[in-house]
């Protein structure tokens, strides 16, 4: 049990010490996960709108696929991309393996089904009058969609936060695609995994606490943003 | 023709919500769709506004998509300021913020909303939301302005102002106001043609259109209100009894008339009786057959004083 108390002290020491290596690890984590979630939002949210409001055939089947992919094991996503990015892989020539780019790609694959499925579920419950009202006021189809996006922004932001939560803490894909290379592809979860294999439980837990602290600050910022939107109602 | 509906049917699941073999609506002529709840008024307005497609048949509109707007009964206000909501449609049309606000101002003023234009709409009362939506719809200046129960749930202080505003809009050249309501008196005051809807079908208007009838004992017939003298009244065709002999009952009105016409109307027969003025009576085909009625026959028409609704008093 001692190592839990030690981990709190350790986390505090690490943060207070402003260890440049730790800061680089946190920075890489936020940067990679943040970019992956943003990319998944750019790709996934329009897809969610198309699935809910579009008329293309096979929408139902596609939704089930994305619902299922929410449970994709991060190791499986990692291996899948590894097979593409390794030297003999289809995209091996790009030289992306063991770079932050590869880690971002893995996290994108994990975040996108969440962005699609949860946003679609949220839009299912959105007020149907939004679309009708925008249409009868003379908006284009795209304008009406943007109106829906604006009206549901707090919920959609929450969907992206959930996607961020999924990838920010995942270790499998980052380990396989990034390789946990010090000063290069080491993020908080892979650093934790490395500490555990070295038997440094309290340091690993300290990193876990830091991860939670970062997630907390980001959630708080997200909430503030959402609440700000509501206040403008 | 502004709108032309042909063989239009609208189903929601197994329920046939609207069944209109033909309906033509002229430009510039205000029309009121009148009928009880669930009679298909809102469905019809949605089709006319192009917000919904008919299950069968065609709805033709002599204008673009932006020439028609619908103010719904339970309107949605966007999460922006009141002014932001009211100018939204004009902004969609590429009109500048300033010009749009100028166009919206008179409507907001008339509906008592100008002073709250900078406020967010979240805390608005039902009445305020409706007035905001009316201003938003009217400010667009579309060819066709569709209003779904515009006076329902309106703060009492604004009913008259809203009615006047609607009448003014209806009188504007090139503008056609189509309104759904179950307030027949408002329809009469607007001078609108009344289209009566019942179970999604067109019915004859239960109204002696244009005929001013003297009310009271010894004049015309009895009403439950204290009205005497000329008035425009309406009698629900389902409240009218037909008989071959005079009926001695509590009903105060019993007059002799002659059958002008009889036609099948959905599940009922619509019998038009001429008693110096015309009135509709809905009876079942079974009763109609049993009484052996045919045009030209004399019948007694009986209805209670409470069945007479006074729509407008005076000249």
Image (cartoon, grey):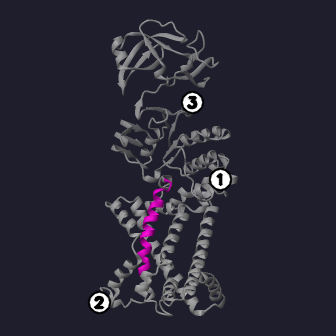
Q: Is residue B97 visible?
A: yes
Question: Which residue matches tag 2?
Answer: A88
Q: What's the residue at 42%, 81% (across, down)?
A: A173
Q: CA distance from mark 2 to mark 1?
A: 62 Å
Residue toward you, B33 or A79:
A79
Q: What's the residue at 44%, 45% (across, down)?
A: B46
Looking at the rendered structure, the secondary structure element under dot 1 is: loop
Instruction: Where is residue B109? Give x, y as percent.
Output: 67, 49
Few, some or many residues within 10 Å of mark 1 (<14, 14–19, 20+): few
Residue toward you, A99 or A175:
A175
Instruction: Where is residue B195? Give x, y as percent.
Output: 45, 33
Q: CA distance from mark 1 to mark 3?
A: 32 Å
Question: Which residue matches tag 3?
Answer: B185
| Quadrant including the N terminus of chain A | bottom right
Q: Are marks 1 and 3 on the same chain?
A: yes
- Badge 1 or badge 3: first in the primary sequence: 1
Question: Which residue matches tag 1?
Answer: B123
Q: Which residues are magenta?
A: A105-127
Residue A61 colored in magenta in the image: no
Residue toward you, B137 or A130:
A130
Looking at the rendered structure, the secondary structure element under dot 2 is: loop
Q: Does residue A144 appear left or right of residue A61 in this picture?
A: right
Q: Are marks 1 and 3 in contact (CB under 8 Å)?
A: no
Q: What's the residue at 51%, 34% (across, down)?
A: B192
Q: CA distance from mark 2 to mark 3?
A: 82 Å
Q: Does residue B203 appear left or right of residue B231 in this picture?
A: left
């Amino acid at each position: 049990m001692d190592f839990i108390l030690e981990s709190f002290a350790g986390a505090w020491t690490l943060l207070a010490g402003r260890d440049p290596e730790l800061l680089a690890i946190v920075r890489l984590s936020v940067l990679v996960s943040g970019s992956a979630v943003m990319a998944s939002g750019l790709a996934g949210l329009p897809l969610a709108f198309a699935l809910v409001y579009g008329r293309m055939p096979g929408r139902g089947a596609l939704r089930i696929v994305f619902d299922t992919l929410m449970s994709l094991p991060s190791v499986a996503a990692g291996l899948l991309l590894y097979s593409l990015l390794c030297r003999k892989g289809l995209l091996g020539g790009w030289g992306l393996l063991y770079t932050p780019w590869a880690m971002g790609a893995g996290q994108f694959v994990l975040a996108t089904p969440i962005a699609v499925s949860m946003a679609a579920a949220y839009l299912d419950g959105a007020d149907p009058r939004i679309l009708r009202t925008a249409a009868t006021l003379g908006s284009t189809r795209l304008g009406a969609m943007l109106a829906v996006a604006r009206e549901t922004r707090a919920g959609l932001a929450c969907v992206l936060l959930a996607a961020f939560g999924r990838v920010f803490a995942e270790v499998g894909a980052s380990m396989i695609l990034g390789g946990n290379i010090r000063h290069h592809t080491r993020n908080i979860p892979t650093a934790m995994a490395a500490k555990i294999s070295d038997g440094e439980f309290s340091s690993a837990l300290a990193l876990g606490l830091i991860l939670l602290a970062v997630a907390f600050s980001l959630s708080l910022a997200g909430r503030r943003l959402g609440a700000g939107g509501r206040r403008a109602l | 023709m502004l709108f032309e509906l042909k063989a239009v049917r609208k189903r929601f699941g197994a329920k046939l919500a609207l069944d209109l073999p033909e309906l033509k609506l002229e430009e510039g002529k205000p029309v009121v769709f009148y009928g009880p709840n669930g009679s298909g008024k809102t469905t019809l307005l949605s089709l006319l506004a192009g917000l919904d497609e008919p299950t069968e048949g065609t709805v033709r509109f002599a204008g673009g998509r932006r020439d028609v707007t619908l103010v719904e009964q339970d309107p949605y206000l966007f999460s922006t300021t009141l002014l932001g909501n009211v100018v939204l449609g004009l902004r969609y049309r590429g009109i500048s913020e300033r010009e749009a606000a100028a166009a919206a101002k008179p409507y907001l003023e008339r509906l008592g909303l100008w002073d709250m234009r900078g406020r967010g709409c979240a805390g608005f009362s039902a009445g305020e939301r409706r007035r905001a939506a009316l201003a938003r719809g009217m400010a667009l200046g579309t060819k066709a302005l569709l209003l779904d129960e515009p006076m329902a749930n309106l703060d009492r202080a604004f009913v008259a102002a809203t009615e006047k505003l609607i009448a003014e809009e209806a009188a504007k050249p090139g503008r056609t106001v189509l309104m759904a309501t179950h307030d027949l008196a408002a329809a009469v005051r607007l001078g609108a043609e009344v289209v009566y809807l019942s179970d999604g079908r067109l019915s004859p208007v239960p109204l002696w259109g244009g005929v001013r009838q003297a009310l009271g004992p010894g004049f015309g017939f009895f009403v439950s209100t204290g009205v005497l003298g000329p008035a425009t009244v309406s009698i629900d065709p389902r409240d009218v009894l037909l008989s071959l002999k005079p009926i001695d009952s509590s009903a105060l009105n019993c007059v002799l008339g002659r059958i002008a016409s009889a036609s099948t109307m959905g599940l009922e027969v619509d019998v038009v009786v001429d008693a110096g003025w015309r009135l509709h009576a809905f009876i079942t085909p079974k009763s109609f057959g049993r009484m052996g009625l045919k045009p030209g026959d004399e019948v007694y028409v009986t209805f209670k004083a409470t069945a007479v609704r006074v729509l407008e008093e005076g000249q």
